[in-house]
Image (cartoon, rainbow, N blue to C red):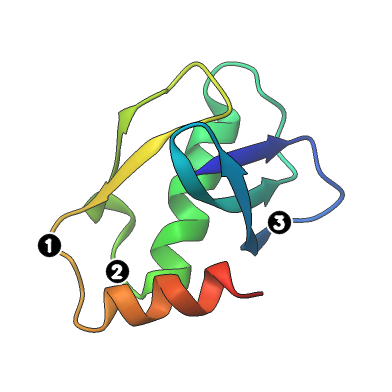
Amino acid sequence: MRVKPGARRDAVGGHRDGPSGTALVVAVAAPAVEGKANDALCRLLAKAFGVRRQDVTIVAGARGRDKVVALDPAPPGAAERLAALLAR
């Protein structure tokens, strides 16, 4: 994931090519203070993938813009949904 905190509105979609490969871009209106942007990220991803908020975990990068996120359990069709979001 590539997170853009402090955006005008919350949005999930698009891609960014970086040194680690292609990343899904997530814009959150919440500021990057006291974990607010991370909470907003997890809430948005849960909604985008149709899972509970508790099923979304930040595995790496909690303090940076580039993050690794896990959906556990992964919903059916998660790979297809991710591909659709990256294509936006």
For label 2, the SS is loop
Image side of residue 53 versus residue 41, left or right: left
Residue 11 in percent (x, y) is at: 69, 61
- Label 3 Cα crowd, 10 Å radius (few <14 / some 14-19 / many 20+): some
Alpha carbon separation for disc pair 2 and 3: 18 Å
Q: Are marks 1 and 2 in contact (CB under 8 Å)?
A: yes
Residue 57 position, x and y percent, is 28, 41
Q: Is residue 23 above or below residue 49?
A: above
Asked whether the beta carbons under mark 2 and mark 3 sit within 8 Å of each other, the answer is no
Residue 73, quarter of the rendered image: bottom left
Whole-percent x, y for residue 62 in the image: 42, 22
Along the viewing direction, whichever of 20 and 69 lies nearer the viewer:
20
CA separation in Å, label 3 and label 1? 24 Å
Q: Mark 1 or mark 2, which is nearer to you?
A: 1
Residue at the spot x=19%, y=82% of the render? 76
Residue at screen point 43% across, 35% down: 20
| Pointer 3 residue | 10
Whichever of labels 2 and 3 marks the residue nearer the N terminus, that label is 3
Q: Quadrant of residue 71?
A: bottom left
Q: Secondary structure at mark 1?
A: loop
Query: For numbered disc 3, what is the local secondary structure?
Result: loop
What is the C-alpha distance between the residues marked 1 and 2? 9 Å
Position of residue 12 relative to residue 50, above or below, is above
Q: Residues within 10 Å of mark 2 (few under 14, many from 20)?
A: some
- Per the image, the residue denoted by label 2 is 51
Looking at the picture, which amino acid does disc 2 mark?
Val
- Could you tell me which quadrant the C terminus lies in? bottom right
Give the residue number, with chain letter if any, for mark 1.
73
Indicate the amino acid at tag 1.
Pro
Q: Amino acid at mark 3?
A: Asp
Who comes first in sequence, dot 1 or dot 2? 2
